[in-house]
Image (spheres, rainbow, N blue to C red):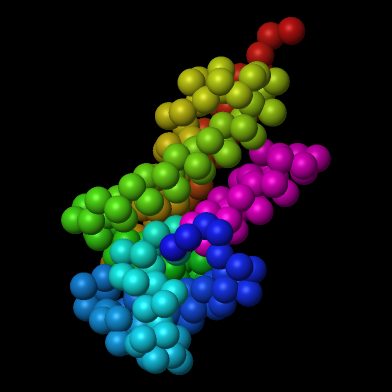
Amino acid sequence: MSSVLAPAAEERSHEILASIRQAFAEKGFDGASMQDLARAAGMSVGNFYRYFPSKAAIVVAMCGYDLAEIQGEFSEIQTSDKPMACLRDRILNHFSEESMKDGQLWAEITAAAIRKPEIGEAARQMEESIVSMLSAIFAHVTKRNIEDARKRYEGQCQMLVMLVKAMATRTAQCGPASPALAAQVVALIDRILLDVSSDRAEG
C-alpha cells in the first residue's frame, strides 16, 4: 500500500482494515479469501482490490496502521510526568480483555510471517520501531543518549515486546491467562522497568 495516498483514500483504507480484522482473524491468512474480506468490508471484490491487491498487502497495511496507533501512545508516554508508570499502564492495558481480542489476528500474522517474506519484513520493522520507541523512553528516564540506551537496554525492550506478543497469542490459543501466570508476567515487567529506572547515568 502506498504511503502517499490522498487523505480521503487513506482514511477509507483504515475503515476497511477495521472492518475486516475479525474476518481475517477468524478465517486465518490462508482461509480468508479476498471475496470473504471484501464482503466483510461491504465492498465489491473489484473495488476491494483497488485498495489491497493481495492478502500480504493487507497484513503490511495492518502493521502500519497499528504502529501509527502505538506511536501515538508513546508520544503521550514521553511527555508524561511519570513516563515509566505511564509505560507500565500502557503495557498492562494491552493485556486487557478488549486488547486481547486481536490475539488471534496477531497469531495468524506471526504464522504467515514465517512463510511470506514481505509479511515477515513488515512484522520485523514493526517490532524494530517499537524497540526504538522503548529505547527513547529509557534514554529519557536514565538521562542517557539514544545510542547508549539502545545498546544498553535492547534486550529489555525486546523482552517487553515479546511478552505482549506471547500473551496475545497464548490468549488466542488457550484462553485468558490464569491469575498465577498473569502475576508472573506482571512481576517480570515490573522487574525490567525497575532495573532500567535504577540504572541512571552518572553525572
- In depth, the one of 98 and 19 nearer the eye is 19
Residue 15, quarter of picture:
bottom right
Q: Is residue 31 left or right of residue 71?
A: left
x and y percentages locating residue 178 in the rendered image: 39, 61
Residue at 56 percent across and 26 percent down: it is 195
Taking the view exactly as shown, the residue that stands out farthest to the top is 203
Residue at 46 percent across and 28 percent down: it is 154
Whether residue 168 is visible to the viewer of this picture, yes or no, is no
Whether residue 146 is visible to the viewer of this picture, yes or no, is yes
Q: The C terminus lies in which quarter of the figure?
A: top right
Q: Is residue 119 magenta?
A: no
Total marks placed: 0
In this view, 12 is above or below 125 = below
Q: Is residue 57 left or right of residue 140?
A: left
Q: Is residue 88 magenta?
A: yes
Q: Is residue 171 left or right of residue 96?
A: left
Residue at 31 percent across and 64 percent down: it is 56
Over which residues does the magenta segment extend?
64-93
x and y percentages locating residue 146 in the rendered image: 60, 24
Q: The N terminus lies in which quarter of the figure?
A: bottom left
Residue 22, quarter of picture:
bottom left
Residue at 23 percent across and 56 percent down: it is 116
x and y percentages locating residue 48 in the rendered image: 40, 82
x and y percentages locating residue 109 in the rendered image: 32, 61
